[in-house]
């Protein structure tokens, strides 16, 4: 292990090394004058932060304004690429720190690791039965999504991955002088390639482009990392509890929305979804093909050397006759395992093509298990066959579908289709105008009737036909790819019970849900509400209670294993009510729905629609898990992994492993504590919840007074941020607003957050929290002490306060002040910006009092240092962005050239701030 007094010294060395290479490249491409220009701007921004003066501020503005093409774009790219290099260096340092822990003597355990969680359980004196039950209930589903603010192209990601690999190799103390020289040459070449690669997309990605981008992470890391996490848990349980034979279920899964999320995206058609499923299967089969070829090389045992399991020999002889032509049979008869693998390869390659292929993935698992059990009979009992066990786990995890694809659509689409269908068969003239009670009764009657409603397809409008085609496609997908290929249908903007019943009716018409004449029910899909706005979260418990009381819905639920999934939207709730209120309403909704469902003996899985940014519920995965009501964790956790965080979390295998290990360890430890009855009463204090309700009420009032109460606010938002310019950045296939509307209600939460982040105001991530906390703290003398106690003892509150600290650290109002120059009416600009500034100071003051920190993020010095390291380099991009937007909005003549440069600043700021939108 490298022994250094300063654990970040090696990180700083990497940053310096990469910075020096970038400097050489700038000189090569733009001459010494380009490097000097970049250095001048960098030093001015650093000095401006250290010692603000009007003179240095004006000097910086003059330097920015004096830049002309092509130097201007080169300066922008220099700062942007610097951030990509810093991001790589920081990720490499995380890998380095993890390896340092692994090289430590026994007894030194890395915090928030699977080993630390198992060690904690060992110390907790849990019974074997409780531990196994915790393992059985363990469930984490991570769903990758396709509405990213990931501005980085895949070509750039691949270059970044190569740079990271070289940095890791350079840490090897056994390198020869020549090897080190070769690596440093390669490093220089890859940084040069990064500089010479166009980082902006020239067209909007199609949905299939997005699908392929998502599959990249499965191919590069997830396919191998997921079984490794399971194996690590098995190994640690065996080490700490050697007398037990633990069974670790497949608790960690990945799913996807990419290609299935129809809400507001007309480009996601049933045909696109079908193509997505085919691409996913193709990758899974390719991976199994590679794995079986590898196993064939390893398992060369001969019947002349070992005695083999009779069942295996019989299966090989039978399968060769059934599936293999003479010239396809493995030529060495005594190499029985290789004969078996040759059959398996043939059948994998025929999946989806002929009846010679495996029909379901369980058949492949069975074949692999037969081989494993046979080999284990002639292996020492204390030596596990980890390679074949890993392949078995992979097939169990990924099947032939790779990742379960969720389908999502807006409730209004279903209502319109049902209205037309019911009118066509003379059930009711205008379903949409019925009261909620009338809708529920009518839909219940339809679901209680085995006969179908539908007429011929061309009797309906194009829109209704499209909705019906989705359900027919789901039915077909279950037959072609297996029932795990599509398990959940999400209803966005769920506001009433009828929104879910409508989907069940449409599923019935496609044969996914069936009521037989004898009263028995078949149901092949989970129907899940998406509760998004503050009002919907409050209404959530009643919506679900109404459904649980209906026999037709209970029969459906029973057929789905008495399991109900409920998705919680973090983005729209935050947009409507502010981050603090939204997070509290989400917490309360989970409690109330969980308690209500318990009365019906229904298990709930909450699906957390978190964004990558702090304003959309973002933050580290393990902290996201711990911030939920502890009693809800036993039924599993499902969380979105937004496009913008995929590269930072899953591009590198070591980082992917560490990210998933932290999530698994957090859930394992939290679930074990809840399972231990004696600790149930210590989960939360009722006084804390009362306090949080009070804080939330004050925060909501403050937030809405600005966002909805100030008639000029929307003007300020549109003009004082690069909202308009974001639409030209080709980062996603979805439109920026629903229905192409200009209304605030129809603006998607993603551009809302992204625009505020770019302008460094970041109000979705912190605004109004200070008023809420400060007002409560000043109501009684003891209230501040209560908030401090909540911070120390309540994971939800601690996570909330820490995320607010990070938001304030990443926001920068001195830089943000530049953006008010973009507002046409300076009176409006000054008034609203002054309000934001006052709230910022108020929030910072109360956060420091509650946390006991002297400075923001003192409790996480690594993150604090990272932000300090980045800020002086982000500032120039902000100054440049404002200058360019002013030029572009004032003059159409140079708009195309200037727009490209604006987009470069957007990409650079996103790279600099990391969790962007």
Image (cartoon, grey):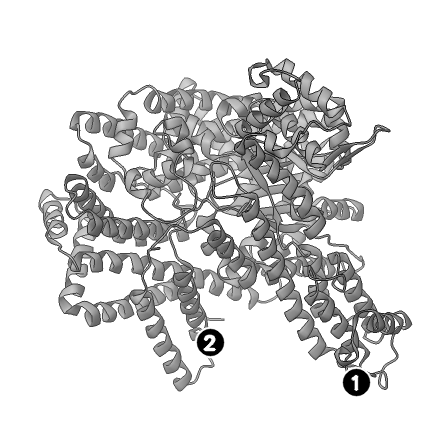
Q: Nearer the viewer, residue 185 or 543?
A: 543
Q: Nearer the viewer, residue 386 or 739?
A: 739
Q: Considering only vertical position in the picture, is 730 above or below 563?
A: below
From the image, tell me which residue sits under label 2. 172
Q: Is residue 854 visible?
A: no
Q: Nearer the viewer, residue 675 or 538?
A: 538
- Give the mark nearest the N terminus, 1 or 2: 2
Q: Residue 569, which numbered label?
A: none
Q: Considering only vertical position in the picture, is 338 above or below 550?
A: below
- Label 1 or label 2, whichever lies nearer to me, is 1
From the image, tell me which residue sits under label 1. 332
**Residue 490 placement, left or right of 362:** left
Image coordinates of residue 627 in percent, x first then y, are: 55, 38
Residue at image coords 55%, 62%: 219
Image coordinates of residue 463 in percent, x first then y, are: 53, 32
Give the Cα distance between marks 1 and 2.
43 Å
Q: Nearer the viewer, residue 401 or 570?
A: 401
Image coordinates of residue 55 in percent, x first then y, are: 8, 46
Residue at image coords 31%, 32%: 840
Q: Considering only vertical position in the picture, is 359 above or below 311?
A: above
């Amino acid at each position: 292990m490298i022994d250094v007094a300063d654990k970040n010294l090696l990180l700083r060395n990497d940053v310096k090394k990469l910075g020096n290479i970038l400097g050489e490249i700038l000189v090569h491409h733009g001459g010494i004058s380009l490097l000097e220009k970049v250095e001048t701007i960098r030093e001015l921004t650093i000095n401006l932060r250290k010692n603000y003066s009007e003179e240095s501020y004006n000097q910086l503005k003059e330097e920015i304004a004096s830049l002309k093409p092509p130097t201007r774009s080169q300066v922008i790219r220099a700062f942007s690429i610097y951030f990509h290099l810093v991001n790589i260096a920081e990720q490499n340092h995380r890998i380095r720190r993890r390896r340092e822990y692994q090289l430590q003597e026994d007894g030194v355990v890395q915090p928030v690791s699977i080993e630390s969680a198992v060690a904690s359980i060992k110390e907790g004196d849990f019974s074997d039965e409780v531990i196994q039950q915790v393992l059985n209930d363990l469930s984490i589903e991570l769903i990758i999504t396709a509405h990213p603010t990931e501005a980085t192209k895949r070509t750039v990601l691949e270059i970044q991955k190569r740079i990271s690999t070289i940095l890791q190799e350079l840490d090897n103390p056994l390198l020869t002088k020549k090897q080190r020289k070769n690596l440093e040459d390669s490093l220089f070449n890859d940084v040069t390639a990064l500089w010479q690669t166009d980082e902006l997309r020239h067209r909007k990605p199609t949905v299939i482009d997005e699908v392929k981008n998502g599959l990249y992470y499965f191919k590069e890391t997830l396919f191998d990392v997921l079984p490794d996490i399971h194996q690590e848990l098995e190994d640690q349980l065996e080490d700490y509890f050697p007398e037990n034979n633990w069974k670790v279920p497949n608790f960690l899964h990945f799913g996807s929305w990419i290609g299935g999320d129809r809400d507001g995206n007309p480009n996601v058609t049933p045909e696109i979804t079908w193509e997505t499923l085919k691409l996913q299967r193709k990758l899974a089969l390719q991976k199994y093909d590679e794995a079986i070829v590898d196993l064939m090389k390893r398992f060369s045992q001969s019947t002349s050397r070992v005695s083999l399991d009779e069942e295996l020999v019989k299966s090989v002889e039978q399968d060769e006759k059934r599936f293999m032509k003479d010239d396809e049979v493995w030529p060495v008869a005594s190499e029985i395992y290789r004969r078996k693998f040759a059959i398996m390869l043939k059948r994998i390659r025929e999946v989806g093509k002929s009846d010679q292929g495996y029909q379901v993935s369980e058949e492949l698992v069975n074949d692999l298990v037969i081989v494993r059990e046979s080999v284990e009979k002639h292996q020492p009992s204390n030596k596990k066959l980890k390679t074949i066990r890993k392949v078995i786990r992979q097939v169990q995890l990924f099947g032939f579908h790779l990742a379960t694809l969720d389908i999502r659509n807006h409730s209004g689409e279903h209502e319109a289709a049902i209205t037309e269908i019911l009118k066509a068969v003379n059930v009711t003239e205008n379903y949409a105008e019925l009261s909620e009670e009338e809708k529920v009764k009518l839909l219940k009657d339809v679901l209680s009737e085995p006969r179908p409603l539908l007429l011929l397809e061309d009797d309906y409008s194009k829109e209704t036909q499209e909705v019906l085609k989705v359900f027919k496609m789901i039915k077909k997908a279950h037959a072609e790819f297996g029932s795990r290929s599509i398990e959940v249908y999400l209803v966005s903007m769920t506001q009433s019970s009828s929104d879910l019943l409508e989907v069940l009716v449409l599923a019935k018409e496609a044969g996914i849900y069936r009521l037989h004449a004898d009263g028995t029910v078949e149901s092949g899909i989970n129907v899940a509400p998406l509760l998004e706005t503050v009002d919907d979260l409050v209404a959530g418990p009643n919506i679900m209670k109404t459904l649980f009381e209906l026999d037709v819905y209970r029969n459906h639920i029973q057929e789905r294993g008495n399991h109900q999934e409920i998705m919680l939207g973090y983005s729209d709730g935050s947009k409507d009510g502010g981050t603090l209120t939204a997070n509290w309403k989400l917490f309360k909704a989970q409690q109330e729905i969980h308690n209500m469902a318990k009365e019906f003996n229904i298990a709930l899985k909450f699906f957390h629609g978190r964004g990558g940014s702090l304003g959309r519920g973002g933050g580290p995965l393990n902290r996201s898990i711990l911030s939920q009501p502890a009693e809800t964790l036993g039924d599993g956790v499902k969380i979105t992994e937004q496009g913008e965080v995929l590269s930072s979390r899953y591009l590198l295998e070591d980082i992917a492993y560490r990210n998933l290990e932290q999530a698994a360890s957090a859930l394992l430890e939290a679930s074990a504590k809840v399972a231990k009855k004696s600790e149930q009463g210590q989960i939360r204090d009722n006084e804390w919840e009362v306090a949080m309700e009070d804080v939330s009420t004050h925060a909501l009032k403050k937030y809405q007074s600005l966002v909805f109460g100030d008639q000029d606010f929307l003007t300020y938002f549109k003009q004082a941020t690069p909202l308009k310019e974001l639409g030209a950045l080709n980062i996603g296939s979805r439109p920026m607003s629903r229905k192409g509307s200009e209304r605030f209600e129809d603006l998607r939460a993603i551009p809302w957050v992204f625009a505020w982040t770019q302008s460094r105001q970041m109000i979705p991530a912190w605004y109004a929290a200070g008023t809420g906390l400060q007002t409560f703290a000043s109501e009684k003398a003891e209230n501040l002490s209560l908030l401090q106690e909540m911070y120390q003892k309540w994971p939800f509150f601690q996570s909330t306060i820490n995320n607010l600290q990070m938001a304030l650290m990443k926001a920068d109002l001195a830089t943000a002040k530049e953006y008010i120059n973009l507002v046409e009416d300076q009176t409006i600009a000054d008034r609203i910006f002054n309000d934001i500034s006052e709230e910022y100071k108020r929030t910072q003051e109360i956060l420091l009092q509650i946390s006991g920190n002297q400075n923001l993020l003192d409790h996480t010095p690594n993150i604090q240092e990272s932000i300090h390291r980045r800020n002086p380099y982000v500032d120039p991009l902000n100054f440049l962005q404002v200058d360019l937007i002013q030029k572009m909005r004032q003059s159409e003549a140079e708009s195309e050239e200037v727009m490209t440069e604006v987009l470069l600043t957007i990409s650079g700021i996103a790279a600099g701030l990391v969790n962007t939108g």
